[in-house]
Amino acid sequence: MGFEKNPLPKSLSLSIRLGIGDSKNHISQIPNLKSINMTLFDVYPLFPFELTKAEGCYVWDENGNKYLDLYGGHAVISIGHTHPHYVKSITDQLNKIGFYSNSVQIPIQKELAQKLGALTGGYEDYSLFLCNSGAEANENALKLASFHTGRKKIIAFSKSFHGRTSAVVAATDDKSIIAPVNETSNIIFVPFNDEAALEVVMNDQIAGVIVEGLQGVGGVQVPTDSFLQKIRSLCDKFGALMIMDEIQSGYGRSGKFFSHQHSNVKADIISMAKGMGNGFPIGGIIIAPHIEPKHGMLGTTFGGNHLACAAAIAVCDIIKQENLMHNAAEVGTYLMVELKKISAIKDVRGYGLMIGVELDNYADVRKKLMIDHKILTGVSGKQNTIRLLPPLNITKSEADHFLKAFAEVVN
Ligand SMILES: Cc1ncc(COP(=O)(O)O)c(C=O)c1O
């Protein structure tokens, strides 16, 4: 069966589509933009400027001010802003095909899986499910743990942040962002790094334990090696899945591909997003071979589309070619060693280029860094902590520039 022929004469059918000759047509009723009062729903405190240009570790505002970007749009910029290979890959892909849904073969998803697998250093035999954001990756991780075990209960930890949707916001330790509709008795909270408390609640009703590689929003809190190893052994004992949320700490930021690899453990499901697309929205989970897929179990319209895969493949290429994990380890260690010498700082925590700097007057220091020194940083206000989350290609001289400014501001 072919397509139905348009029964109307060409000129008439065109006037109908454009609404010409129809006094009630919508276009003629659209008012001038100046009279429209629609505003943005006000959910964020904002930096007092807009950004109009970005390159490498720098961004520029509308007045031409140049900022050293140690925030990376919330740990998203992994390979640096507007990297030429990244821009070219996305542009070339868009000129071929930008999107089609998962109803067709999308071979560049396989290319991405292979390139990602090669970078992971130990997870080559896992499989990849692609989606669009961090929260969505974690939702799929919890859902999969529940499907796989047939159980409902999830263990999460104090100071955790796993996203703002359904089950993952319930697994986030911040009551102020959990709406009544998200409340559930399926999440059990345990103090972070408390092995004894974990042992008490672990049993054969638990579907999974979700933990961040490095707690981000919680102020860059580092899980101890033995805590992660305890989670692993208890999950094995009770048939639960260990889910590592590497959305902020993953993709090379910690100096290893995943932060938990510092602790010599292996998870069953690992969630990723942020650095994965360097700003192009993409997320995903990698899944252990013992977890069997079924059609319909997980799904998405946009996840793994051509454009997102082109962006994520370019990120993998650049992480490898420019040895960015090594750079993150080297410059990150240097930064932490130098920061620990500054007496005003109460604590320095992290791995690689995910660094928390705790100090009393963190808000003031952060503001002065931005206004006086044109350096952008992140923050975990509840923990009095400035968060450093720069692009992974930051140089030692850029780190020195920051250290000099920081010392000047705190002294
Ligand atoms: C550890 C962690 N998990 C999940 C998320 C949620 O990611 P998204 O904002 O892409 O939904 C975040 C975001 O900050 C995060 O830091």
Image (spheres, rainbow, N blue to C red):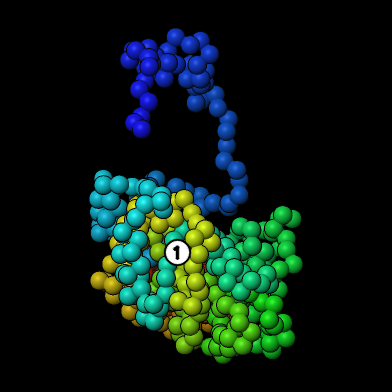
Q: Is residue 397 left or right of residue 336?
A: left
Q: Amino acid at mark 1?
A: Phe
Q: Is the CB atom of the residue marked by disc 1 within 8 angstroms of ligand 1's nearest atom? A: no
Q: Residue at x 66, y 77 (%)?
A: 206
- Residue 310, position as x, y percentages in the image: 32, 57
Tell me if residue 404 can be seen.
no
- Residue 172, position as x, y percentages in the image: 64, 66
Q: Residue at x 44, y 51 (%)?
A: 302
The quadrant in which residue 85 appears is bottom left
Q: 301 or 57: nearer the eye?
A: 301
Tell me if residue 182 can be seen.
yes
Q: Residue at x 34, y 31 (%)?
A: 2
Judge the density around disc 1: few (<14), some (14-19), many (≥20) Cα neighbours within 10 Å.
many
Q: Residue at x 42, y 13 (%)?
A: 20
In the picture shown, does residue 73 fall above or below 247?
above
- Residue 329, position as x, y percentages in the image: 38, 80
Q: 88 or 19: nearer the eye?
A: 19
The quadrant in which residue 322 appears is bottom left
Disc 1 secondary structure class:
strand
Number of marks drawn: 1
Q: Quadrant of the N terminus?
A: top left
Q: 229 or 337: nearer the eye?
A: 229
Residue at which label 1 appears: 129
- Residue 7, position as x, y percentages in the image: 38, 17
